[in-house]
Image (cartoon, rainbow, N blue to C red):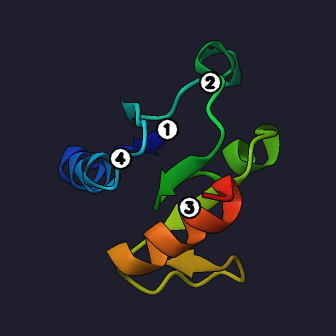
């Protein structure tokens, strides 16, 4: 599940995942935890900026995507290659 407020970013990351034969569900905006549970995704790709409160509520593994440096201590993924490698690690594919 790719989550974010920037439509272009969510679409680009979703398309990249589809090209790698991964199932993907783009979500524009920030869903409620209950909405995420309906889809039961294995991994979430969170497109920065995203509220820390939201990150604390989710139980699934997640990856934070940002092409810009974010002043936080959370590890970021900022290239499509890094994203795919991280997805492989989390999905064990």
Q: Earlier in the sequence, mark 2 or mark 3?
A: 2
Which mark is drawn over residue 21? 4
C-alpha distance separating marks 4 and 2: 21 Å
Q: Which mark is residue 87?
A: 3
Q: To which residue does mark 2 refer?
A: 36
- Dot 2: within a 10 Å radius of its alpha carbon, few (fewer than 14), some, or many (20 or more) residues? some
Q: Quadrant of residue 52?
A: bottom right
| Residue 58 position within the rendered picture, expressed as x and y whole percent measured from the top left | 76, 39
Q: Earlier in the sequence, mark 4 or mark 3?
A: 4
User: If you read the primary sequence from the N terminus, does the residue marked by circle 1 or circle 2 appear first?
Assistant: 1
Marked residue nearer the N-terminal end (4 or 2): 4
Label 2 to label 3: alpha-carbon separation: 18 Å
Instruction: Give the CA distance from mark 4 to mark 1.
Output: 14 Å
- Residue at (25%, 52%) from the top-left corner? 19
Expressed as whole percent of the image width and height from the top left, the position of residue 74 reads 69, 76
| Numbered badge on residue 1 | 1
Q: Are marks 1 and 3 in contact (CB under 8 Å)?
A: no
20 left or right, relative to 32: left
């Amino acid at each position: 599940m790719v989550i974010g407020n920037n439509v272009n970013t969510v679409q680009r990351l979703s398309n990249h995942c589809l090209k790698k034969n991964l199932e993907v569900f783009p979500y524009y905006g920030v869903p409620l935890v209950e909405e995420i549970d309906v889809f039961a995704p294995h991994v979430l790709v969170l497109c920065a900026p995203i509220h820390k409160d939201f990150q604390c509520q989710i139980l699934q593994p997640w990856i934070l995507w940002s092409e810009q440096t974010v002043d936080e201590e959370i590890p970021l993924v900022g290239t499509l290659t890094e994203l795919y490698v991280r997805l492989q690690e989390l999905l064990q594919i």
